[in-house]
Amino acid sequence: MARNSDALEKIRSGQSMSRSEMIRMIYQLSLPAILAQLSTTIMEYIDASMVGQLGAEGSAAIGLVASSTWLFGGLNAAATVGYSVPVAQAMGANDERRARSLVRQGMVVAMAISLFWTLVCVLISGHIPVWLGGDPAIRRNATLYFAIFSLALPWHELNHLAAGFLQ
């Protein structure tokens, strides 16, 4: 563990690092992000196999609103990126007070944005399947799926925010 703190101290103080120290630091910093992406991919495969068990109508209902879940999930997650970068910069500058302030501010702003998108999505959940031209037989399930997805947006935002701050 001393090697990690030594390398971090070198970065913060502007000292040069050996090639092996840089490679070790890159590996240690990238491994959590790589594992997070791997676990996300595995969960997407599990999700797809579970959706397949719902049958043609269930799969069609979820598929109908998939583009909308991606859109609103992406809009919701945008605040995460907006705060992760300045927090990382403050930590790199060894300005812990500013980093803590940015984390608090990021949590408040991200939750406000997330709750706004949740409200919008719940309000339009019954209209999305119609707007997308969904068959009347699958509209009810598509509406329910999108509404449930919408209610989970704040939890997704907290997850993205926490992961971004940790990285």
Image (spheres, rainbow, N blue to C red):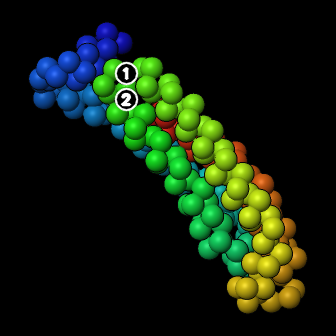
Q: Position of residue 110 (x, y in %)?
A: 60, 45
Q: Quadrant of residue 46?
A: bottom right
Name the residue beneath numbered marker 2: 90
Residue found at x 77% / y 59%: 119
> Where is 37 relative to 117, above or below?
above
Q: Is residue 139 visible?
A: yes
Instruction: Give the quarter of the figure containing the N terminus.
Output: top left
Q: Which sits earlier in the primary sequence, circle 2 or circle 1?
A: 2
Relative placement, left or right, of 91 versus 72 is left
Q: Say which of 102 and 1 sits in front.
A: 102
Q: Position of residue 148 (x, y in %)?
A: 80, 59
Helix, strand or loop status at disc 2: helix
Residue found at x 47% / y 42%: 83
> Where is 14 relative to 68, above or below?
above
Q: Are dots 2 and 1 in contact, CB under 8 Å?
A: yes
Name the residue beneath numbered marker 1: 95
Residue found at x 79% / y 79%: 127
Q: Position of residue 59 (x, y in %)?
A: 74, 75
Q: Say which of 13 and 50 sits in front.
A: 13
Relative placement, left or right, of 86 versus 125 is left
Q: Is residue 10 visible?
A: no
Relative placement, left or right, of 123 versus 98 is right
Q: Quadrant of residue 69?
A: bottom right
Relative placement, left or right, of 123 versus 162 is right
- Residue density around tag 1, few if under 14, some if 14–19, many if 20 or more, within 10 Å: few
> Where is 37 relative to 24, above or below?
below
Helix, strand or loop status at disc 1: loop
Task: Say which amino acid is labelled 1.
Answer: Asp
Q: Say which of 53 and 121 sits in front.
A: 121
Task: Say which amino acid is labelled 2.
Answer: Ala
Instruction: Give the quarter of the figure containing the C terminus.
Output: top left
